[in-house]
Amino acid sequence: MFPTRRIAVISAALAVGAGLLAACSSSGSGKTSKNSDGTTNISVAYAADGAGFSDLYVGVDQGIFNKHGLNVTIKQITPATLVPSVLSGDVQFAGGVADGTASAILKGEKLKYVALTEGTYNLQLWASDKIKAPGDLNGKSIAMTNQGSETDFALNSYLQANNLPDSTLQRKYLVKTPAMISSMESGAVDSGLFQPPQAQKLLKNGFHVLSSLSNLPYAVGAYIAQSSYLTKNPDVVQKFTAAETENLAYLRAHPTETMASIQKHSGNDNAADAKIAYDFFINVWKKDPTVTPDLIEQAFQRAASKTKTSAPSDPSQYIYSSAS
């Protein structure tokens, strides 16, 4: 028989191992932690820098999330890691373009859309001084990020809206904003799609804003969560969407404070750039975070076309409802 002391040590080790196993198995399972003041700790990721996610910035800076019982930590990540961060349980909610989530759902991932804060493209089309109208783009080149990205879909929508063929522009996929700007400064590319105020320095090279795409519908700022998390934590979802409603109202009512948050969180602390961004996004931010079914349906159609699959006949099943 083992000595009593050895049995106690082995028992303790087994208990620790069981605890670690349970922790691993609960990753992403929907468990949340609460603080002594009654607030619930959650993490929210967003897949773009800049002013677009100012709803999160003011929600944290102005204590709006806390007012609704949530202690929120926000983190900026890449678009490619948006869905994986939710599926791993690293974050409870994540915001980005709706298309990536639609693609993941078509592959079998259990995700739902919870809120939508931007209902149009958040891009401007910058062009050289020789390009005065959309028709002047014919035969020219355009700097973009990645194939299948928001810039790709935005150009498709822009060309369609202006009755121009897809072959109008030669697309240059340069991935990063600095590379896009450098190519335009050097004269290698004639135009580009940018989120304000990224391209302001191009003014000195004779470029100008040819068009704003904020009048073309698109689902950006689409917040998602695991279906299992939503089922287990309806109270947290209700608090999150209520806070987002107040965040969006705050953006419109408090420009000075919002611009200060943009400077603090966007990676650009220039006050003039913050105002340019705010003046643009005030026409992009929705007035409430309700998910627009038509925009989600369009996201599924684009995702299905890209992956050569079929879009769901009823995309509303992937939009969270307290009754679902």
Image (tube, rainbow, N blue to C red):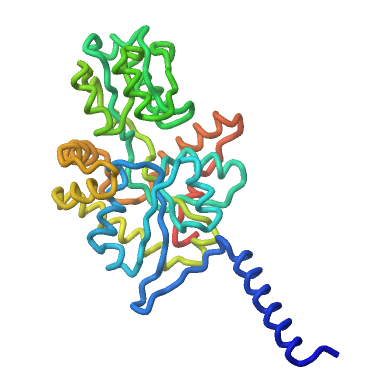
- Residue sitting nearer the eye, 9 or 58: 9
Q: Residue 216, percent across and down? A: 32, 30
Looking at the picture, how far across and down is residue 284, in whole percent?
27, 39
User: Residue at horizontal 25%, vertical 23%?
Assistant: 211
- Residue 247 in the image: above or below residue 209: below
Left or right of residue 276, residue 106 in this image = right
In-image side of 7 versus 268 (left or right): right
Q: Nearer the viewer, residue 129 or 106?
A: 129
From this viewpoint, which residue is outermost toward the top?
A: 139
x, y (%) of residue 202?
A: 23, 22
Residue at position x 46%, y 37% from top? 299
Q: Is residue 118 left or right of residue 95?
A: left
Work out which quarter of the rendered image holds the N terminus and state it.
bottom right
In the depicted structure, whether residue 227 falls above or below residue 183: below
Q: Residue at 62%, 46% (x, y): give it.
A: 108
Identified at 63% across, 70% down, the residue is: 20
User: Please, is residue 120 above or below residue 70 in the view?
Assistant: above
User: How many numbered discs sit on the rendered protein?
Assistant: 0
Q: Along the line of sight, which residue is nearer the eye, 208 or 237?
A: 208
Residue at far right of view: 1
Q: Quadrant of residue 304?
A: top right
Q: Position of residue 53 (x, y in %)?
A: 31, 47
Lateral position of residue 29 relative to residue 175, left or right: right
Decide: is 256 above or below 295: below
Closer to the camera in the image, 252 or 274: 274
Where residue 239 sits, quadrant-wise, is: bottom left
Dividing the picture into quadrants, the one containing residue 184 is top left
